[in-house]
């Protein structure tokens, strides 16, 4: 995990498909990847756009990002030069009283293969890092669209869809960061984006959304090729700029990044006065196989009755492994309740999701 500040010109953030230019040392064939563009609106405050692009060459990626920025912000103009300083103006991270960060979803125009669960799963992954205080909260379905399409921020962090032309490459997703602490994500529902040349098979939108949500949380790319070189963990990260197929779980470098930005050392300030915080809705999604997640505090039987795919839960407590196994007799269950804030190993037989209301 690194923070990349370009010396001059635009910061590039290109998602490169397999078969495209390979990452490597700086040189003629190197991939410039951090595509961050500041756009001044004709009405409203400037906005920082971070693009994820699939394009045959870095030059094409820059071309398609700039053209898309012009399409998205009619009448806007792209700031030239001094991007390092401009980026610094947006170099904010979420304040303690903004966490958990609510993110709403507008499914209008989404490909049929993508539902709210794709967003919820990404929110959950970034919210389940045991050593980080960072968390998202699913804000439900909204009619608002990403503010990139509007004259300015609307006060809601939104994931929405819009067609963006694919020529000579495709913008897959663009995250916009407002100085007023609003971040929106726009995904490209042009069918060509999901089958872009160089991507073997069909694009996995869960992977794209998980990556973009890392930007929403405040992370840059793991590895600034061509300014690298990259370490093995940086190459393996979800926040690596290169799309390499399905990648639905955070890797150690991603976890190190979110922990560095939001360590546990600064817990949210307690609410003023004696009134307790309102209950929060916590969405939980289990994938087939092993999941390592923070769950809301509740009895395991209650959780298992809602999460139908949960087969077993394990935790290392008081010096020993304790387990709950579906169908086992009560005498054999050494784990009966989930402690809020602790992570558990959960084995699922299939995919299932549920929403819990838990008092923090
Ligand atoms: Zn990115």
Image: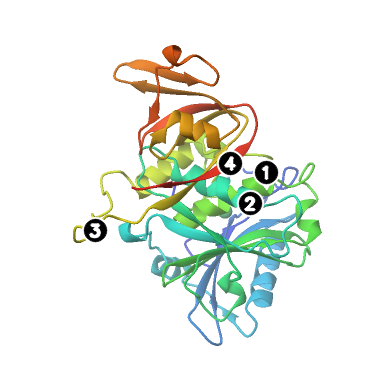
Q: Nearer the viewer, mark 4 or mark 3?
A: 3
Q: Earlier in the sequence, mark 1 or mark 4?
A: 1
Q: Residue at x 58, y 41 (%)?
A: 353
User: From what the image shows, is residue 320 above or below residue 257?
Assistant: above
Q: CA distance from mark 2 to mark 1?
A: 7 Å
| Of 28 and 256, the residue lying toward us | 256
Which label sits on residue 275? Answer: 3
Residue 5 visible in image: no
Asked if the residue at tag 3 contacts the one at tag 1, i.e. Cβ–Cβ closer than 8 Å, the answer is no
Q: Which residue is mark 2?
A: 31
Q: Residue at x 37, y 49 (%)?
A: 261
Single out the mark in the foreground, 2 or 3: 3
Q: Nearer the viewer, mark 2 or mark 4?
A: 4
SS class of the residue under badge 1? loop
> From mark 2 to mark 4, how far is it between C-alphas?
38 Å
Determine which residue is flagged by label 4: 353
Q: Can you give x and y, in whole percent of width and height, for residue 47 in the image?
A: 51, 73
C-alpha separation, residue under disc 4 versus residue under disc 3 = 31 Å
Q: Are marks 2 and 1 in contact (CB under 8 Å)?
A: yes
Label 4 vs 3, first from the N-terminus = 3
The residue where tag 1 is placed is: 22
CB of mark 2 within 8 Å of CB of mark 3? no
In three-dimensional space, the C-alpha distance between marks 1 and 3, rounded to whole angstroms, equals 56 Å
């Amino acid at each position: 995990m690194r923070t990349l500040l370009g010396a001059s010109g635009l910061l590039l953030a290109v998602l490169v498909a397999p078969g495209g230019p390979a990452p490597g040392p700086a040189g003629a064939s190197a991939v410039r990847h951090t595509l961050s563009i500041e756009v001044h609106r004709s009405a409203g405050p400037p906005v920082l756009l971070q693009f994820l692009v699939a394009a045959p060459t870095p030059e094409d990626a820059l071309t398609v990002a700039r053209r898309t920025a012009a399409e998205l912000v009619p009448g806007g103009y792209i700031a030239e030069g001094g991007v390092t300083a401009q980026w610094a103006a947006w170099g904010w991270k979420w304040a303690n009283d903004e966490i958990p960060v609510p993110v709403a979803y507008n499914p209008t125009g989404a490909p049929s293969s993508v539902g709210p669960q794709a967003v919820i799963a990404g929110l959950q992954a970034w919210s389940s890092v045991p050593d980080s205080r960072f968390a998202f909260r699913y804000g439900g379905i909204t009619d608002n669209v990403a503010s990139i399409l509007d004259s300015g921020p609307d006060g809601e962090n939104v994931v929405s869809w819009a067609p963006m032309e694919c020529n000579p490459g495709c913008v897959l997703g663009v995250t916009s960061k407002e100085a007023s602490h609003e971040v929106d994500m726009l995904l490209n529902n042009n069918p060509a984006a999901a089958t872009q040349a160089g991507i073997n098979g069909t694009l996995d939108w869960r992977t794209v959304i998980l990556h973009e949500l890392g930007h929403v949380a405040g992370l840059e790319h793991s590895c600034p090729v061509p300014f690298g070189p990259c370490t093995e963990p940086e190459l393996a990260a979800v926040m690596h700029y290169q799309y390499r197929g399905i990648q639905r779980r955070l890797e150690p470098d991603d976890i190190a990044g979110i922990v560095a930005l939001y360590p546990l050392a600064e817990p949210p300030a307690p609410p003023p006065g004696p009134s307790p915080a309102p209950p929060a809705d916590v969405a939980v999604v289990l994938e087939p196989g092993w999941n390592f997640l923070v769950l809301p505090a509740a009895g395991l039987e209650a959780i298992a009755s809602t999460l139908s795919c949960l087969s077993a839960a394990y935790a290392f407590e008081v010096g020993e492994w304790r387990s709950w196994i579906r169908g086992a007799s009560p005498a054999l269950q050494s784990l009966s309740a989930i402690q809020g804030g602790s992570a558990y190993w959960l084995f699922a037989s299939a995919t299932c999701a549920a929403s819990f209301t838990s008092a923090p």
